[in-house]
């Protein structure tokens, strides 16, 4: 009965919110060493048009990427079964009104990021726990091309043209490392699953710590199973991932770490240091095909800000 109560509380849909997608969580495990997956996130899915307005993530996993030199500075405990990959990630952030050419003081700055991500995920199939590492290197600012992309899309759709991108966060280096840990708390016949999660990010764009839970319900392979175990041909489940973030630094709000010439940024005192975030979604795995629809919610990231809303879709194929 207590497990049913936990599921009712955690799987109740909340208003959906915004963030850059993170595909390294157990709920998005494809269960293969070789795959390609595309994520497209947009505030269109929640009928909003502000803050994280668009996110694109294209990832590729393959055993050949084990030779990546960055893997030598990733944490993978002995005995883990690992898979390796790379991804290209692009994110675009806008204030509540992207049309005016003048700065909207007290609102979110315009910002864009473009990065290449290398990741390695190790699963301890005995202790039912996972370690997920990722190094990201790229750019924040106009060189990331977020303004040009949004303008191009709006020129070809019935939307107003964004005029505020000249005020975006200035060009700077994006260099970030993240390490996530997940540990099984409950698994009932691969129909109900609960894991505890913790994550730390350190770098020039984001420095923060998260802790939360991942809850899955439906029909699925064991999330901590070996790749060598033949799985179900059809899997269908819903998931919910609530978490609390403690934020030390966010360059999309405060500007880059090195270039202080941004036309407008928020001050350190304006940043919310504790933020609640919730992601929920539905996943279907049909043979080698992975399909997902998700929505996200986040409380205010800064004083005077709004709760954020976003959603997206993902399509993946095992190779």
Image: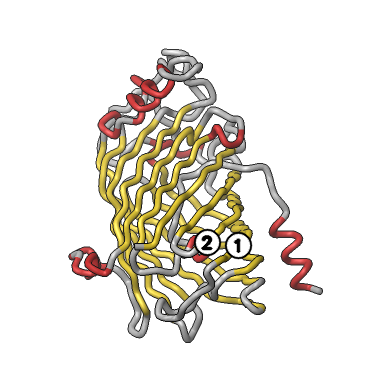
Q: Secondary structure at mark 2?
A: strand
> In the rendered view of the protein, which quadrant contains the C terminus?
bottom left
Residue holding disc 1: 236
Q: Nearer the viewer, residue 290 or 67?
A: 290
> In the rendered view of the protein, which quadrant contains the N terminus?
bottom right
Q: Quadrant of residue 69?
A: bottom left
Comes first in the chain, label 2 or label 1: 1
Q: Nearer the viewer, residue 313 or 42?
A: 313
Identity of the residue drawn at 35% across and 53% down = 59
Identity of the residue drawn at 33% across and 83% down = 78
Q: Position of residue 32 (x, y in %)?
A: 39, 68
Disc marking residue 285: 2
Q: Position of residue 8 (x, y in %)?
A: 76, 61
**Residue 224 vs residue 215: left or right?**
left
Q: Nearer the viewer, residue 234 or 154?
A: 234
Q: Nearer the viewer, residue 36 or 162?
A: 36
Task: Determine the CA span between mark 2 and mark 1.
Answer: 6 Å
Callout 2 touching callout 1 (CB < 8 Å): yes
Q: Residues within 10 Å of mark 1 (few under 14, many from 20)?
A: some
Disc marking residue 68: none
Q: Secondary structure at mark 1?
A: strand
**Residue 103 vs residue 7: left or right?**
left
> Relative to 73, is 151 above or below?
above
């Amino acid at each position: 009965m207590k497990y049913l109560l936990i599921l009712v509380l955690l799987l109740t849909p909340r208003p959906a919110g915004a963030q850059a997608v993170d595909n390294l969580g157990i709920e998005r495990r494809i269960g293969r060493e070789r795959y390609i997956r595309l994520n497209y996130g947009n505030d269109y899915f929640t009928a909003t048009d502000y803050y994280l307005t668009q996110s694109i993530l294209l990832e590729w996993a393959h055993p050949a990427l084990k030779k990546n030199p960055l893997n030598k500075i990733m944490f993978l405990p002995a005995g883990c079964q690992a898979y390796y990959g790379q991804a290209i990630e692009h994110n675009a952030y806008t204030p509540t009104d992207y049309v005016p050419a003048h700065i909207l003081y007290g609102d979110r700055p315009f910002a864009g990021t473009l990065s290449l991500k290398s990741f390695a995920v190790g699963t301890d199939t005995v202790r039912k726990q996972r370690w997920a590492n990722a190094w990201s290197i790229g750019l924040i600012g106009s060189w990331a091309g977020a303004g040009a992309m949004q303008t191009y899309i709006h020129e070809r759709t019935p939307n107003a043209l964004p005029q505020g991108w000249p005020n975006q966060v200035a060009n700077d280096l994006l260099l970030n490392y993240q390490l996530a840990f997940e540990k099984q708390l409950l698994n009932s016949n691969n129909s109900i699953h609960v894991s505890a999660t913790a994550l730390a990010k350190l770098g020039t764009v984001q420095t923060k710590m998260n802790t939360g839970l991942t809850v899955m319900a439906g029909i699925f392979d064991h999330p901590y199973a070996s790749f060598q175990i033949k799985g179900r041909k059809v899997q269908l489940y819903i998931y919910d991932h609530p978490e609390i973030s403690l934020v030390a630094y966010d360059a999309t709000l405060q500007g880059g770490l090195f270039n202080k010439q941004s036309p407008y940024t928020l001050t350190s005192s304006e940043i919310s240091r504790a933020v609640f975030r919730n992601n929920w979604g539905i996943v279907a795995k049909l043979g080698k095909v992975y399909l997902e629809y998700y929505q996200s919610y986040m409380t205010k990231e800064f004083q005077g800000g709004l709760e954020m809303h976003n959603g997206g879709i993902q399509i993946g194929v095992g190779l």
